[in-house]
Amino acid sequence: MQLQSQPDNSFDSIIATGLFDGADEAVTQSLAAGTSQQFIKKGTVLFIQGDEAKYVYIIHNGWIKLFNETLDGDEAIVDILTTGDYFGDSAMFGNQCYTFSAEVAEDVTATLIPIQQFRNIIEEHPVIAINMLSNMSRRRKQQDMELEHRTLQNAPQRIGCFMLRLCPEGVTKNILIHLPYDKTLVAARLGMQPETFSRALARLKKEAHIEVQGATVHISDLNELTTYSCSACSSSYPCE
Amino acid sequence: MQLQSQPDNSFDSIIATGLFDGADEAVTQSLAAGTSQQFIKKGTVLFIQGDEAKYVYIIHNGWIKLFNETLDGDEAIVDILTTGDYFGDSAMFGNQCYTFSAEVAEDVTATLIPIQQFRNIIEEHPVIAINMLSNMSRRRKQQDMELEHRTLQNAPQRIGCFMLRLCPEGVTKNILIHLPYDKTLVAARLGMQPETFSRALARLKKEAHIEVQGATVHISDLNELTTYSCSACSSSYPCE
């Protein structure tokens, strides 16, 4: 691992998670003792599925890819996380090992909390457990939607849905967005082979009238894209 | 709803969830005040996505289908639950509404806990929040696997995987299992159209040498089935 300590903004990312909302100051003071903030380069593998869990990671900025590998050598994306997300907490339950591998998809700054310290804090401050339950419920709902999309949306609709989630709120015409990471990773995140993704993107451009140049996407009419993608979904735009 | 009160076994199903492990007796006494146990017939719709959440349901026996419907009228299965599972708890967070619909897939006996009472108990007994986090982590891991299977396993492998999870532990030859609910629902649970399911089942029977008659499945050699299904999975048999 290539790790470099960063001295500033130690608690901004921790606060942003909402994890410690409602907890008293003793928690942040207790956290100050054991945590570290790290800058980690793209491509760094933080841990492998089955490794003993040492830290809960809170992302300050950048992108982290969580994934698993099969016996056949294929890779399945579990999740792709960014600012304000945290991971590694689930290892506290079960056999204390990470249940997935983690790699830095785009340079990351993260706060690392030793896992035993994190567990002690939760047990002493029930409000944090409630915050975690709330966060986990929200993420489960997202996973439910992801599974639903795999079943009911076709590939172009799923790419359209991915783009819609990047759109700023309240704007409906002439929207410019940027894909946050490599197209190959976007394809993997959506459970598509690269060639399926290319064909689906071409179809989406034609049928929903959007333009794509490199990582930049131009959506002239948001309603056209929502009509195209959201008809095959049980939620309506904007999603919760 | 067709509901009939059942007088017996009021707390067996509650205990079986593991939710209240480590909590003191005051909890079970406090639960006794507001809960009821109900027998509910197959086909009953308990609630619809978006309904105000009234109860957390703990399943004593039978099967419950959680699902969503899209604007196009398609149905996506969120989960299919049975003995010892509970649902409706996630509505405590967010906007206090159910985020999916629930229907009885096979006759059910369930304990209903008023949602505000459930929330009060959690806030008073932090150990229950920790138990819930543990349970939710396990279910998230299962969802991760489900998403992985949709990406990397083909349809016959996914049916094989479903059957493997019904096999008794420690037996490797001449195993007889019974599909727990309708084949149509098994297909939907696996995100397949009925015709895809039929073709995939035919291929599985031929390639992994299993026999299927109605809801009964005969697996002559478990190793053959695990080799067939688990090679395209990041976990190995038996799964956690």
Image (cartoon, coloured by chain):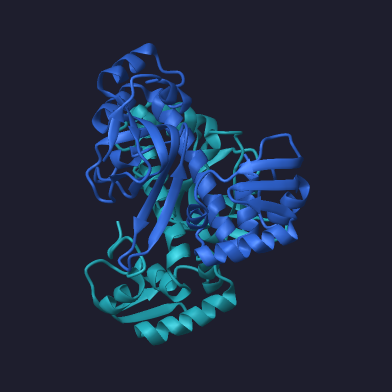
Chain colours: A cyan, B blue
Work out whether residue A126 or residue A15 is closer to the camera in this orientation and state it: A126
Q: Viewed as shown, does residue B88 lie left or right of B81?
A: left
Q: Quadrant of residue A195?
A: bottom right
Residue B114: x, y in percent? Answer: 26, 30
Work out whether residue A87 or residue B47 is closer to the camera in this orientation and state it: B47
Work out whether residue B148 or residue B162 is closer to the camera in this orientation and state it: B162
Residue B107: x, y in percent? Answer: 40, 38
How many numbered marks are there? 0
Q: Is residue B225 above or below residue B59?
A: below
Q: Is residue A41 above or below residue B133?
A: below
Residue A48: x, y in percent? Answer: 65, 48
Q: Is residue A114 above or below residue B16?
A: below
**Which quarter of the rendered picture does the C terminus of chain A lie within?**
bottom left
Q: Viewed as shown, does residue B239 lie left or right of A26?
A: right
Q: Residue at x 36, y 27 (%)?
A: A126
Q: Residue at x 70, y 58 (%)?
A: B205
Query: In the displayed image of the protein, which residue is found farthest to the top?
Result: B25
Q: Residue at x 43, y 69 (%)?
A: A153
Residue A35 visible, this orientation: yes
Residue B153 visible, this orientation: no
Q: Residue at x 46, y 77 (%)?
A: A215
Q: Is residue A92 above or below residue A138?
A: above
Q: Viewed as shown, does residue B188 lie left or right of B153?
A: left
Residue B179: x, y in percent? Answer: 57, 46
Work out whether residue B12 or residue B203 is closer to the camera in this orientation and state it: B203
